[in-house]
């Protein structure tokens, strides 16, 4: 089972939207997928209820000390995506330690980068022990009318972690799809194109 944590120190960075759409993307690519919702806000579980279980399972796990054991007990899924908690908490640390890949969605603004500094340092410390851990930023909720994305990308690259070339724009289609219990893949839109491109890049990064 390949474990991917989607984490962010700041709330509202789009972790749940990204987790659900990535899960659907990997599923369409042929992988068996499960999503673990570790956030008390239960946004992934709310979407799952709205979807009536049409796609993949979403389950709650809220005990950091047993997280690894609980995930192992799930069975043989190809991909496990952990929709993480905001801020550095025990659950976030546990998620990083058991993951093969940590994805850090971040809004393209200096405030959001500064707010993530403690998270970045924590991951660097864990990576000293877990050398094979892969880490990547995803520029999320980008306003395509601005030119700030490239300067943000340079700043993120300077952390030593990869910043994925494909980003996700701020689009109503992501909000609409979640409200309807579907994903961007069920829509004919730019949102779907973005997620397809992101999944393709992630698969290449995983296989490197």
Image: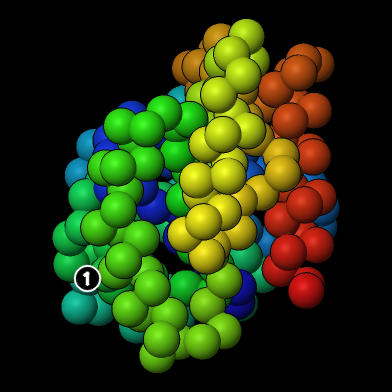
On the image, the x and y values in percent for residue 105 come to: 48, 43
On the image, the x and y values in percent for residue 16 come to: 44, 38
Residue furthest to the bottom in view is 129
Q: Quadrant of the N terminus?
A: bottom right
Q: Nearest the camera: 157 or 185?
A: 157
Q: Residue at x 48, y 30 (%)?
A: 108
Q: Residue at x 62, y 65 (%)?
A: 79
Q: Is residue 166 above or below residue 50?
A: below
Q: How is the image coloured?
A: rainbow
In screen coordinates, is 69 left or right of 106? left
Give the secondary structure at mark 1.
Answer: helix
Q: Quadrant of the C terminus?
A: bottom right
Q: Is residue 123 above or below residue 127?
A: above
On the image, the x and y values in percent for residue 7 come to: 39, 52
Q: Nearest the camera: 110 or 42?
A: 110
Q: Nearest the camera: 119 or 32?
A: 119
Q: Residues within 10 Å of mark 1 (few under 14, many from 20)?
A: some
Q: Is residue 183 above or below residue 164?
A: above
Residue 25, by quadrant, is top right
In screen coordinates, is 25 left or right of 21? right
On the image, the x and y values in percent for residue 86 come to: 26, 46
Q: Residue at x 61, y 51 (%)?
A: 163
In screen coordinates, is 11 left or right of 161? left
Using the rendered image of the protein, determine whether residue 52 is visible from the camera's viewpoint.
no
Residue 147, by quadrant, is top right
Circle 1 residue: 64
Q: Residue at x 56, y 54 (%)?
A: 157
Using the rendered image of the protein, determine whether residue 198 is visible from the camera's viewpoint.
yes
Q: Is residue 47 above or below residue 123?
A: above
In screen coordinates, is 107 left or right of 185? left
């Amino acid at each position: 089972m390949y474990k991917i944590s989607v984490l962010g120190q700041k709330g509202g960075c789009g972790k749940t939207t990204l987790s659900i759409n990535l899960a659907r993307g990997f599923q369409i690519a042929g992988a068996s997928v499960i999503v673990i919702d570790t956030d008390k806000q239960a946004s992934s579980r709310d979407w799952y209820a709205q979807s009536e279980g049409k796609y993949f399972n979403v389950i709650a796990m809220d005990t950091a000390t047993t997280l690894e054991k609980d995930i192992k007990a799930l069975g043989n899924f190809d991909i496990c995506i952990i929709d993480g908690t905001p801020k550095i908490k025990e659950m976030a640390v546990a998620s990083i330690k058991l993951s093969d890949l940590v994805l850090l969605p971040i809004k393209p603004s200096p405030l959001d980068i500064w707010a993530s500094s403690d998270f970045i340092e924590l991951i660097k410390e864990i990576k000293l022990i877990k050398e094979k851990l892969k880490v990547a930023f995803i520029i999320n909720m980008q306003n395509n009318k601005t030119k700030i994305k490239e300067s943000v990308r340079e700043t993120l690259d300077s952390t030593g972690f990869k910043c994925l070339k494909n980003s996700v724009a701020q689009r109503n289609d992501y909000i609409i799809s979640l409200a309807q219990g579907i994903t961007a893949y069920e829509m004919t839109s730019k949102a779907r194109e973005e997620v397809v491109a992101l999944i393709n890049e992630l698969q290449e990064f995983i296989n490197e």
